Image (spheres, helix red, strand yellow):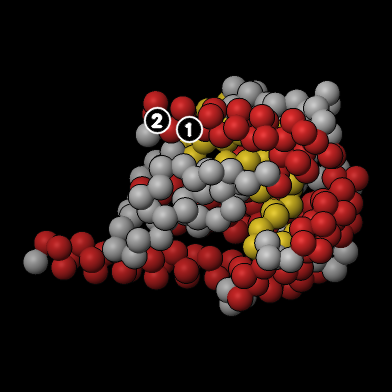
Amino acid sequence: MRKTTQNIGHIFYRIWFYILVTLPIILFFPFLIISTLSEKWYPQFFWLARNLWARPILLGMGCPQRIYWEEKLVRGKSYMLVANHTSMLDIMLMLRISKNPFVFVGKKELVKIPLFGFFYKRVCIMVDREDSRSRTGVYRRAQRRIDQGLSICIFPEGGVPEEDVFLDDFKDGAFKMAIAHNIPVVPMTFYDNKKRFSFTFYSGGPGLIRAKVHSFFETALLEDEDKTTLREEVRNVIYKELKTRS
């Protein structure tokens, strides 16, 4: 009986999540559409997404945030934001952490999500990992966004790993891009999102979600051949933090 009650609670918790994801998009649809008509208006779209979408979702899910900072982001500066990826809440938490507007780089399959996918296609940098031309195009689009004063966000595991994987191997893309565009890499550790809302259906629940913004890795003196070392150093920072505080 207790297990059945818990499962019913998990079902309603997930339904509530999708309501919270969808409702702000419907309510603010005209403003969201207008803010995507020009790349110059992306900071306005970002403000809407951060404050009128991500914030209500996290609050409505009963997930207050606590952020630990080793180094602060400087307003107006571009960064490569990276974090471990375990939950759909990662997107909302990243939006709440950075006041600096940034653009997500993500897989094209997310376009298929109703309503969310419509805006994802318009404002994010999509990559088809099976297509080398798509991967090359990502660098050009990222450079244009950086030239506009924006940051880039990539989850370097390349997707959400299996539930039993503590921290998957990192792909090169984020680090190769950071070196090519001469922007600092900002590692972040997300401790609790998997516990709060994982991809296991009968799981999750309200509670504190914590994140740590680690000291930045500068790339000004690095060359392309340094990307593997940079990748592993960043992964080790996140891995050790997860081992220590999870």
Q: In this view, does 7 lie to the left or right of 19?
A: left
Vertical placement of residue 172 versus 198, above or below: above
Q: Is residue 68 above or below residue 110?
A: above
For label 2, the crowd category at 10 Å Cα-Cα, with few meaning under 14, some 14 to 19 and many 20 or more, is: few
Q: Is residue 152 visible?
A: yes
Residue at position x 38%, y 66% from top? 14
Q: Can residue 74 be seen in this view?
A: no
For this orientation, the residue located farthest to the left is 1
Alpha-carbon span between mark 2 and mark 1: 6 Å
In the displayed structure, does residue 179 sit left or right of residue 130?
A: right
Q: Is the Cβ of the residue at disc 2 closer than 8 Å to that at disc 1?
A: yes
Q: Nearer the viewer, residue 2 or 143?
A: 143
> Percent x, y for residue 199?
40, 60
| SS at mark 1 in the image | helix
> Type of residue at label 1?
Tyr
Instruction: Give the residue displayed 84% in from the left and 34% down from the top.
Output: 182
Residue 137 shows which numbered tag?
A: none
Count neighbours of disc 1 (C-alpha within 10 A) and say few if under 14, some if 14 to 19, many if 20 or more: some
Q: Where is residue 213 in the image (x, y as percent from the top left)?
A: 58, 31
Disc 1: which residue? 239
Based on the displayed image, in which of its 4 quarters is residue 228 positioned? top right
Pointer 2 residue: 243
Residue 90 position within the rendered picture, expressed as x and y whole percent measured from the top left: 53, 50
